[in-house]
Image (spheres, rainbow, N blue to C red):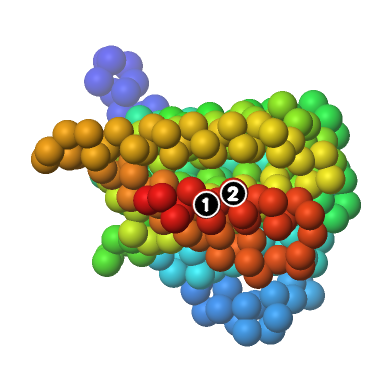
Amino acid sequence: MRPSLVFLATFLFLISAQPATRAALPQTSTSHDRTFWRNIIKNNYRVPPDQSVFPLVQELSSYLGSPDPELRDDIAYTLINAWIAYQKQLSPQEVIGFADEWQSNLRNGIGETNTDSALLRSFSALCLGAVAERDLKTPLLGVTRYRLLLNNALNYLRDEQDLRAFDPVKGWIHATAHAADLLHFLAGNPLFTVEDQRRTLQAISQRLSSANLIYTYGEQDRLAVTTLAIISRVDFDAAFFQTWITTMEATDRNVWKSSPPNDHLLKTFQNDNYFLESLAARLCAEPKSRTITTALDLVTQILRKR
């Protein structure tokens, strides 16, 4: 048989085998329409009796980078958060598996700006917040995995360059806020050390100063919530907190040493100012204790000078 005929025969054989392969795919890979997911949400997040939650979360996880805000946020994150943090539908080992995947996502395209890769990073951080919240209620990570997650969260807060908050078409991106939410739950954990307090506070001030924009979608407030979680700890390092916040204030005063003011310093000043105002309001709303009152007095004194 001539080579061309051999090729033709092989090609026809492969084509004839394709239908069986295609027919088998739906048995191993199933996607659901929006109505399916909306009905679950309407039904108080109950898993349908003919479904298993693990493959459903696998499917939802694949939507975390979607530019469709309903699919990514209203459906995927909403259900993942409900099933992991509140209903505890997944086993500890299943949660750990997803946590590993989402931590890997934090580095996917890191450093890019104005690309859709930010969606996957930011919403993976938000889902990791559900893992950290679950771990607070029923510990499952252990020391090694907890420390890895904390390190990855701090690195993500530092390294994310796409700081868009909201896109009129793609919806919320909000990377700084989502990183803050994750750190908030991690900061409440018994495994969070005094040294971790210092690292996290330094990461917060670094993020406020390195943003090179003035946050306008509540990012400073979410970082203040994380800070409040640190202040509320029984092992709170009040001396370091005072040094840290005083250093922040001393740096901010440099903005008024030139006219017109340095643009970067002015943005940092405004971010710090909104952060301090939010922290003061949060502290005021807390039940009074010696620690809370002392921290509030310190923040208030700084605000009076600004």
The answer to the question of whether label 1 and label 2 lie on touching residues, with beta carbons closer than 8 A, is: yes
Is residue 81 found left or right of 2 in the rendered image? right
From the top left corner, tell me how far across and down residue 232 is, in percent: 75, 51
**Which structural element holds mark 2?**
helix
Name the residue located 48 percent from the left edge and 48 percent from the top edge: 302
Bin the neighbour count of mark 2 within 10 Å (Cα to Cα): few under 14, some 14-19, many 20 and up. Answer: some
Q: Which kind of residue does numbered mark 2 sit on?
A: Leu
Bin the neighbour count of mark 1 within 10 Å (Cα to Cα): few under 14, some 14-19, many 20 and up. Answer: few
Q: Which kind of residue does numbered mark 1 sit on?
A: Gln
Q: Is residue 184 above or below residue 204?
A: below
Q: Quadrant of the N terminus?
A: top left
Name the residue located 79 percent from the left edge and 26 percent from the top edge: 144
Is residue 43 found left or right of 92 in the rendered image? left
Q: Is residue 262 above or below residue 119?
A: above
Q: Nearer the viewer, residue 266 or 110?
A: 266
Q: Nearer the viewer, residue 30 or 156?
A: 156
Residue 66, can we see it? no
Name the residue located 54 percent from the left edge and 39 percent from the top edge: 245
Name the residue located 59 percent from the left edge and 49 percent from the top edge: 298
Residue tagged 1: 301
Q: Nearer the viewer, residue 223 or 66?
A: 223
Residue tagged 2: 298
From the top left corner, tell me how far across and down residue 304 is, in percent: 44, 55
Q: CA distance from mark 1 to mark 2?
A: 5 Å
**Quarter-wise, where is residue 183 in the image?**
top right
From the top left corner, tell me how far across and down residue 249 is, in percent: 44, 39
Q: Is residue 126 above or below residue 281?
A: above
